[in-house]
Amino acid sequence: MRRYGKHTDEDDIRSRPNRRGNRPRTHIRPKHEDAAQGLVLTVDRGRLTCLVEDRTVMAMKARELGRKAAVVGDRVALVGDLSGAKDTLARIVRIEERTSVLRRTADDDDPYERVVVANADQLAIVTALADPEPRPRLIDRCLVAAFDGGLTPLLVLTKSDLAPPEKLLELYGDLDIPYVVTSREELETGDAAARVRAELDGKVTAFVGHSGVGKTTLVNALVPEGRRRITGHVNAVTGRGRHTTTSALALPLEGGRGWVVDTPGVRSFGLAHVDPSRVIHAFPDLEGGTEGCPRACSHDEPDCALDAWVAEGHADPARLYSLRRLLAVREHTEGD
């Protein structure tokens, strides 16, 4: 083995390659002050389609963002090739602060929450009145997710030609939730799309619903140029629909008067991430009564101060019942 003396020449020193030479030598990262602003339209296997000015750009997340992921609706900063030409790729270097988030978990025991849509103004909960039968508990769960994430809920009831809407609407009358009732014939004539569009004007609206309720059909009627494959059907045995949308997609309404975000059909909506203290913000008439509640109050226990608040006439008892019914779905599995 060769040994080195006191007077070694620099050429005699063995140099080992740095296996980590691809890592940055400083923790100071570029600020990307000249980055372009974009909107995430859809995400597919690590590739994000973004709208930059008037063109769509394919991008990937920059390494420096770590585990932070961008989702549909995110406002992002991009660098690199922003031409939108085929086989080009930009980098997302920053995700701007979100104004709202629609989140869900796979089930109530799953600790990992998933952000479905960011920066939406409202959540359109699409439910068929028949074929398949409505699932009030799933609607309740979507309402809780909307209230928790800062979205305003909107009920869209389809297939009114098969069943009347009054019984289902009665369950949500005390929540003062806006709603639109449509029939299959109205979808064909365009009347349904016109009435729903009036509720979407100037807003970013995420559409969510059980498979087979006609959600994507309605989205296609609202945004004809963004048509998606709708070959799914309702299983005659299980009453469940086949998924026709496999990834969330943001589509602009005509005239730039809002956005529609079509999301995959859901069979469950886990709420493991929901904090009751955030849901109460959607009930301003009850929120003031929580000041006397014990710490970490579930708002459905003997020491809850909301009972006295309602008894003193500050709020309608029906509103407290509705709040507790919504919070109760966090503790039970879904069912009709």
Image (spheres, rainbow, N blue to C red):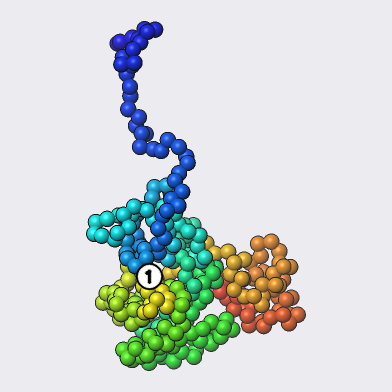
Location of mark 1 (residue): 250
Relative placement, left or right, of 78 versus 273 is: left
Establish if 242 lies above or below 188: above
Residue 212 in percent (x, y) is at: 34, 78
Which residue in the rendered view is the most extreme toward the right? 312
Residue drawn 39% across and 47% down?
63
Establish if 225 lies above or below 70: below
Residue drawn 30% across and 11% down?
1
* Quarter location, residue 243: bottom left
Relative placement, left or right, of 5 versus 198 is: left
* Quarter location, residue 224: bottom left
Residue 128 in percent (x, y) is at: 40, 83
Q: Is residue 262 visible?
A: no
Residue 233 in percent (x, y) is at: 29, 78
Q: Callout 1: few (<14), some (14-19), or many (20+) C-alpha neighbours within 10 Å?
A: many
Which residue in the rendered view is the most extreme toward the left? 86
Relative placement, left or right, of 61 versus 298 is: left
Front residue of this view, candidates 294 and 290: 290
For numbered disc 1, what is the local secondary structure? strand
